Image (cartoon, rainbow, N blue to C red):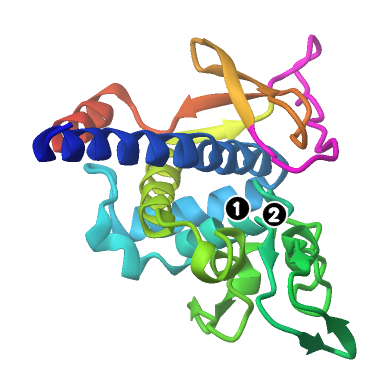
Amino acid sequence: MGEKEYYEELVKNVGLVAYEAGSDTSFSTLLGFFLAMCHYPEVQRKAQAELDAVVGPHRLPDFGDRDALPYINAVIKEALRWHIVLPLGLPHRTVQDDEIDGYFLPAGTILIPNTWAMMQDADAYDKPREFYPDRFIRDGKLDTTVRDPAAYVFGYGRRVCAGRHFADEMLYLAIASVLHVFIIEPPLDENGQPVKVEHRQSPGLISYVHITRVDSLRLNISGGVNRHPEDFQCVLKPRYDSTTNASLLASV
């Protein structure tokens, strides 16, 4: 294989690894966000009020708006924390004898971080089972003293996710844009009452869900393998009329 062919093959492999590592994980975080919006409509309304004030109705949010959207950033942090895509981090191995909090770890010990426990730590997060982005806000700004989920959910040390910054930016655009143009609700039953959307998960090493069917604006979301939210449905309703929607499309 010549040098040119070698680098072409390398580029292909890097692209494939990035796709495999980033598609399901970020996708699962987004679907966990949809589930949260069905449970916490007050969070959705507060985020949309911030978007309306900063972005307005005639364009979609972009990267230039991010610093002016602290609550949206808090929603992203809470989405990463509330629905852990990888409850257990990748294994690490000690290269020399060590001691942590009185525990002796000989060289060669395999360590598997329990990220789920860190994100459900009541000492770090009050009422950790609740989706509460306000925990990251103080005086209208992001509170940097609160444990940042992004420092944990993407892995640790030299094996931290190489695409973590790209994933963070993608989540920002997706979550901000969806909240800007849609209202996310549970479906209605035959009596016109909102269906109770259950938040149950099965145990496992990897947590992800996927969309199996899109029917008009109704998403049928079901679980993949291992740890995942059980099947649920949600309905997306446009926030704006057709004229405003046209101006939004024109801004893209």
Residue appearing at x 77%, y 62% in the figure: 114
Question: What secondary structure is marked by label 1?
Answer: helix
Residue appearing at x 66%, y 59% in the figure: 81
* Whole-percent x, y for residue 233 in the image: 68, 22
User: As shown in the figure, which amino acid type bears the numbered disc 2?
Assistant: Trp
**Segment colored magenta:** 187-208
Whether pointer 2 and pointer 1 mark residues with C-beta atoms closer than 8 Å, the reply is yes
Residue 87 placement, left or right of 163: right
Is residue 200 inside the magenta stretch? yes
User: Which residue position holds label 2?
Assistant: 82
User: Which residue position holds label 1?
Assistant: 79
* Whole-percent x, y for residue 181 in the image: 39, 36
Residue 34 placement, left or right of 231: left
Instruction: Please tell me whether residue 158 is drawn above or below residue 221 in the rendered image.
Output: below
Residue 204 placement, left or right of 169: right
- Pick the quarter of the image with the C terminus: top left
Measured Cα–Cα span from mark 2 to mark 1: 5 Å
Crowding around mark 1 (Cα neighbors within 10 Å: few <14, some 14 to 19, many 20+) is: many
Residue appearing at x 42%, y 51% in the figure: 167
